[in-house]
């Protein structure tokens, strides 16, 4: 079973979840869509229905910070996933431009993570984030900084529980242990990748950023992008690649998928502003 998994908390991201699921439905290459949400609202249920997906509740531990980042590293435990399912775990601030079947083929071989632009662990930004883990895992941090390793982004990750369970257990444990650190689950996975690349038998694959393309930092050519990732709220910023996001949103809005016309303006000030501007024009 090829599953695409989204994780939603609250309502701040529901317009993005709508665009992610609608664009995915269009490109195909999967068997089912699963949305996990600690407290699914009627809107999230409607979004699931609008893409032929399923919604299920999931345990969620609220922390002082980074709760959702930490939770991302434990979603694989959910009983909906069979040990043999290949699962693509994907952020809701994405847009699918191409069929995802080839990425599932990679996941069928190994746990799969995605490169962020052309960044590596010795660059200033990633180096700083890695250093936050120095007290917890000094050996891994030293290894991460000593030689350049690809910097990854956990907006797109692929795994199969039956095969990867020990790696996934560690991802979960590191994320809980390092919960105060920025982009918690991402850096936990980054450290696991560094260790994996030092080991004798590599168990993780890094795919290029055509599968997780930042409109700002991407290395892939625009025509080759298979998944756009509008990290940091770039989905409505045309100057930062948001035009493509907006075109899919507008189509879903026109078709009133998931009753989006009723709620589109309520949760995302950037969308409210844009719809007002269009209404006035
Ligand atoms: Mn994201």
Image: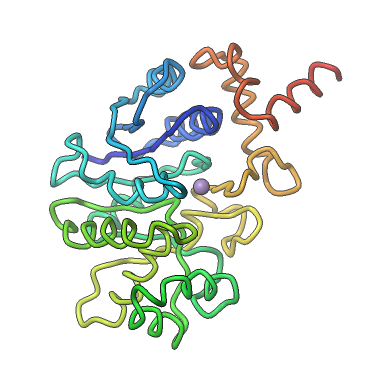
Residues 175 and 165: in front is 175
| Residue 222 vertical position relative to residue 97 in the rendered view, above or below | below
Colour mode? rainbow
Residues 105 and 110: in front is 110
Residue at (51%, 75%) from the top-left corner?
120
In this view, the residue farthest toward the bottom is 146
**Residue 159 picture location, percent across and down:** 26, 53
Q: Quadrant of the N terminus?
A: top left
**Residue 194 picture location, percent across and down:** 35, 76
273 relative position to 155: left or right: right
In this view, the residue farthest toward the front is 64
**Residue 170 picture location, percent across and down:** 24, 62
Residues 240 and 65: in front is 65
Q: How many marks?
A: 0
In this view, the residue farthest toward the right is 281
Residue at (41%, 63%) from the top-left corner?
207
Residue at (44%, 58%) from the top-left corner?
180
**Residue 226 picture location, percent across and down:** 49, 49
235 relative position to 141: left or right: right
Residue at (45%, 51%) from the top-left corner?
155
Q: Quadrant of the C terminus?
A: top right
Residues 83 and 146: in front is 146
């Amino acid at each position: 079973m090829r599953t695409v998994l989204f994780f939603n908390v609250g309502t701040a991201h529901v317009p993005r979840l709508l665009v992610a699921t609608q664009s995915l439905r269009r490109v195909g290459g999967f068997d089912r869509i699963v949305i996990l949400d600690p407290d699914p609202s009627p809107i999230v249920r409607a979004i699931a229905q609008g893409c032929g997906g399923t919604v299920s509740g999931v345990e969620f531990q609220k922390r002082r910070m980074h709760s959702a980042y930490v939770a991302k590293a434990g979603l694989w435990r959910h009983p909906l996933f069979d040990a043999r399912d290949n699962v693509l775990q994907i952020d809701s601030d994405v847009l699918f431009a191409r069929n995802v079947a080839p990425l599932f083929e990679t996941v069928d071989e190994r746990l799969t993570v995605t490169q962020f632009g052309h960044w590596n662990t010795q660059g200033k930004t990633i180096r700083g984030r890695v250093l936050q883990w120095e007290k917890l895992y000094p050996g891994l941090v030293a290894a991460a900084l000593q030689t350049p390793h690809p910097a990854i982004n956990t907006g797109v990750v692929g795994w199969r529980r039956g095969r990867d369970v020990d790696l996934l257990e560690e991802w979960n444990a590191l994320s809980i242990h390092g919960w105060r650190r920025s982009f918690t689950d991402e850096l936990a996975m980054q450290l696991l990748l560094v260790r994996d690349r030092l080991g004798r038998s590599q168990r993780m694959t890094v795919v290029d950023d055509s599968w997780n393309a930042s409109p700002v930092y991407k290395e892939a050519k625009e025509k080759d992008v298979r998944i756009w990732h509008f990290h940091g709220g770039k989905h409505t910023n045309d100057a930062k690649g948001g035009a493509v996001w907006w075109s899919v949103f507008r189509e879903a809005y026109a078709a009133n998928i998931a009753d989006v016309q009723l709620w589109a303006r309520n949760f995302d000030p950037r969308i409210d502003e844009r719809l007002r501007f269009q209404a006035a024009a």
